[in-house]
Image: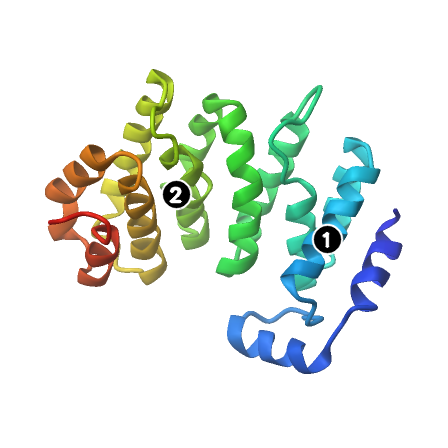
Amino acid sequence: MTPDAALDALRSRADSARASGMEAYHKVARPYLGVPNPVLSDLATEWRRSLPIDHRLSLADALWRSNIHEARIAAAKLLTQARIRPDDEPVWEMICSWVPDFDGWAIADHACIAGQRRISADLARLDRVERWTTSGHMWTRRAALVVTLALTRANHPTPEEAAARDRVLAWAAGYAEDPLWFIQKAVAWWVRDLSKHDRPRARAFLEAHGERMKPFARREAAKYLAL
């Protein structure tokens, strides 16, 4: 599968009316094709299964560089995989290289989902993510929480996973007074998802920092807690 063939496959499924609606919704200036997400998932799954990892990386890079909305999402889906052998470091590096390009939630979230798998594979990667928390780029700061969401999901975390939770919660505490809606929403999302699996930590976070959050974010974070 060459980049040109992949882009042709995306363009053959374009819907101009849907593309116009997507551009108005996302409010980010880039080409939109109007290809539905399930179609992107099917195409990316087909390409992922048929290509070795080095070819997938080349294809993902080309799709990302096209700057087409659906192509960037397909690039992220190409790299979303629980186990990558023998070496997933190039995948992690590519995902990290995309972070400065984030300019909207949809593409950023798909890329972060791919990154979640790589962090689960190696928690030492949190050292790099921690540097994102002080970035002047809002989407990079937000990515530090979205890319670590998988850490909220274990009902019985290992000691290493529990320590990672505490580490990310410390980042979230640093964001508690951030005035930006997307940052507040990311904090709420992280704590809300954590509360489904680790009520004591989620409750303790809100008791310590909830008053510094925006009211809407505090309510969202406490959605599954009786506070």
Q: Height in image: 47 above or below 34?
A: above
Q: Which numbered marker is on residue 42? A: 1
Residue 134 picture location, percent across and down: 36, 41
In the rendered structure, the answer to whether residue 210 lies left or right of residue 15 reads: left
- Let me know if residue 106 appears in the view: yes
Q: Which numbered marker is on residue 122? A: none
- Let me know if residue 71 appears in the view: no
Q: Height in image: 87 above or below 210?
A: above
In the rendered structure, the answer to whether residue 32 lies left or right of residue 188 reads: right
SS category of the residue bearing label 1: helix
Mark 1: amino acid: Asp
- Real-space CA distance between mark 2 and mark 1, rounded to the nearest whole angstrom: 27 Å
Q: Residue furthest top?
A: 159
Q: Earlier in the sequence, mark 2 or mark 1?
A: 1
Residue 30 picture location, percent across and down: 64, 69
Q: Looking at the rendering, which quadrant does residue 5 occupy?
A: bottom right
SS category of the residue bearing label 2: helix
Q: Looking at the rendering, which quadrant does residue 39 occupy?
A: bottom right
Front: mark 2 or 1: 1
Q: Residue at x 13, y 49 (%)?
A: 226
Q: Which residue is mark 2?
A: 145
Residue 185 picture location, percent across and down: 32, 56
Q: Residue at x 59, y 79 (%)?
A: 21
Q: Looking at the rendering, which quadrant does residue 204 occupy?
A: top left
Mark 2: amino acid: Leu
Q: Height in image: 108 above or below 197?
A: below
